[in-house]
Amino acid sequence: MVPPTQESRQHPTMQQRVLRHIDWTAYLYILPAFVILAVFHIFPVFYAIDISLNKGAINKFKFVGLQNYARALTSPDFWTALVNTFSFALMTILAAMALGLLFAYLLYQGVRGQSIYRTIYFLPYVLSTVGSSIVWAWVFDPSSGLANLALKTIGVQPLRWLIEPKGIFQLIGEQLNLPVPAWLHGPSLALVAIAIFTIWQTVGYNIVIFLAGLTNIPGEIYDAAQIDGANSFQLFRYITFPLLSPTLFFVLVISVIGSFQSFNQIYSMNIAAAQTLGGPLGTTYTMTVYMFDQLYTYSNYGYASAIAVLLSALILILTLVNFRFIGARTENMEVGE
Amino acid sequence: MTIALNRDRLIHIIKRLLVHLVLLTGALFSLFPFVWMVLTSLKSYIEASAAENFFPSHWLFSNYVQAWNQVGLFPRYFENTLFMAVTTTLGVLITSSLASYAFARMRFPGRDTLFIILLSTMMVPFEVTLIPNFILMRDLHWIDHYEALIIPWTASAFSIFLLRQFFKAIPSELYDAAVLDGCTHFQFLRSIVLPLSKPALVTSALFTFLGSWNSLMWPLLVTNNPVMRPLQVGITSFITDAGTEVQYLLAAVTISVIPVILIYFFLQRWFIEGIARVGIRG
């Protein structure tokens, strides 16, 4: 406690001062934002849980308890969607983070034209997913797409890309005449193609964030390490990587959330490749697509809500796992801060 | 000695060249879909579907007129999207400025709790609120009305967070001086805080505008009447209308993308520094 001084004794007591300083108008300032967020973003979470316990058309809901959840967890479609969601997340997050780090690190070396490169890399991120998906669906077009044109020039057989339900490892096995067991077929080429698009779209975001993180590392640390004779690999391993790990962690958390919520590119590319939703043969059915299909095509409000709640719970658990296991470790690795 | 130096220089130059080679490959990879999109949109149908020439043999600018006319509602889609994006952005700026100011500068019971509650909405996946909000829109009879496209999105926890960080950094001495001059909170916010916070306001406006311009799932759900559709929904329905006439489809996509590309190239500093600032927050 601070001992009372001559000056503070002349002032009103602490409690009176606090009371006098309360700005009651503050609630008015918060009101508009609070009403919108409460009505459209907070209350619906609870409502969604409520709907997920019901069945039937809107206004004719019938309480069925946990039946929708039981149905989801015993449905093969649900598990396919879950596996697809995980493979999609794994492909996009790993590649976009690795490429993002590589390019940010190269730009960080102080190359000429750094900001021009950065502007170009970030461009795909701001463009509408619908527009870019249509362009990429055309890139992947089996008969006249750029992707097969590129394969042709290096002497590889043309592929069917967005309409290919066969697994990626299965296709590689066929090329090499190796038998691949069914459980090792991997995600369909269609899903891989959508993942390639997603990597293209998000890598620029990662580059910008990583570059900002790299720029935040004080240069003196590098100078000191170089005086001690560290080589460039050691610099990366013992300075850059640990000091950048909070940034890496931030990008990981954002990427996990983003990738599990991916919908727009899958929907648009399905349509642009003249496939049914989640096609070919359901191999691009992710959790969001499954939910949307149940909602939009079949009007299964309760069931779709149950899928949405399960998806949210999954995202929440993964975020907590990230914080618990990776976040805790990056805290320990923070040397300078 | 000089030979060794020259060798070091040579290695240095080769290293630089390699770095630029990788960076250029990345830049090409980022840009080629657009270049190809524009080039294909100017080809004839036969040329576009053959994909043998890189450049069109005849530059058919008339494809754009065709695409524009073929989607009879194109101007309408444009208007809808523009109206939706601009109003949403204005709404977010107003609600966020007010709330952020209260959180950054005013003292009131429950301030931190309320702030955390609002921030927690950033964690909620969009999908889970989709169905309840859709039902709410039906009950409010907002389906096929601008209200459904705009009002749920006129507040954003992300913007509140971004602006609050910025407002907090404004020295409190400024406020003390303003109060001495008889300034109210609202006057202080309007005439001092907001003008000083331009970077944060622009960043927040850009991301809101972009999010609205590019949104798909929500407008898809709440618009049945083609007249009410925004651009992105219109374009996806054009895929089936255009059939195999890919040059018209890509012309339509080009038209829909041009405003965003223009905004981006003029304001790219705000985009990039904005997300860098949010990503690297302390």
Image (spheres, rainbow, N blue to C red):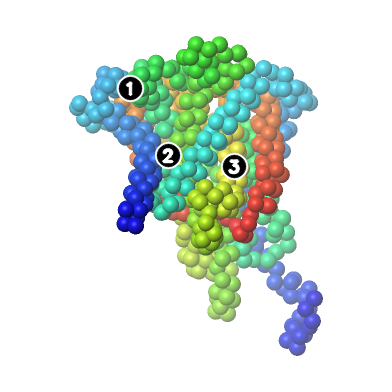
Binning the other alpha carbons within 10 Å of mark 2 as few (below 14), some (14 to 19) or many (20 upward) gives many
Residue B4, position in %: x, y? 35, 53
The N terminus of chain B appears in which quarter of the rendering?
bottom left
Q: x, y (%) of residue B282?
A: 60, 57
- Give the residue drawn at x 59%, y 72%: B172
Label 3, on which residue? Answer: A252
**Closer to us: A328 or A129:** A328
- Cα separation, mark 1 vs mark 2, equals 26 Å
- Left-right relation of B137 to B229: right
Q: Are marks 1 and 2 in contact (CB under 8 Å)?
A: no
N-terminal label among 2 and 3: 2
State the image coordinates of residue B277 (x, y, percent, origin top left). Answer: 52, 55
Q: Report the Cα–Cα distance between label 1 and label 3.
A: 36 Å
Q: Residue at x 46, y 37 (%)?
A: A201
Residue of label 2: A124
Q: Amino acid at mark 1?
A: Thr
- Residue type at the position of mark 2: Pro
Pointer 1 residue: A153
Q: Are marks 2 and 3 on the same chain?
A: yes
Mark 3 neighbour density, 10 Å: few (under 14) some (14–19) many (20 or more):
some
Q: Chain of mark 2?
A: A
Q: CA distance from mark 2 to mark 3?
A: 19 Å
Asked if both marks, 1 and 2, belong to the same chain, the answer given is yes
In this view of the protein, which residue sits in the foreground, B118 or A135?
Answer: A135
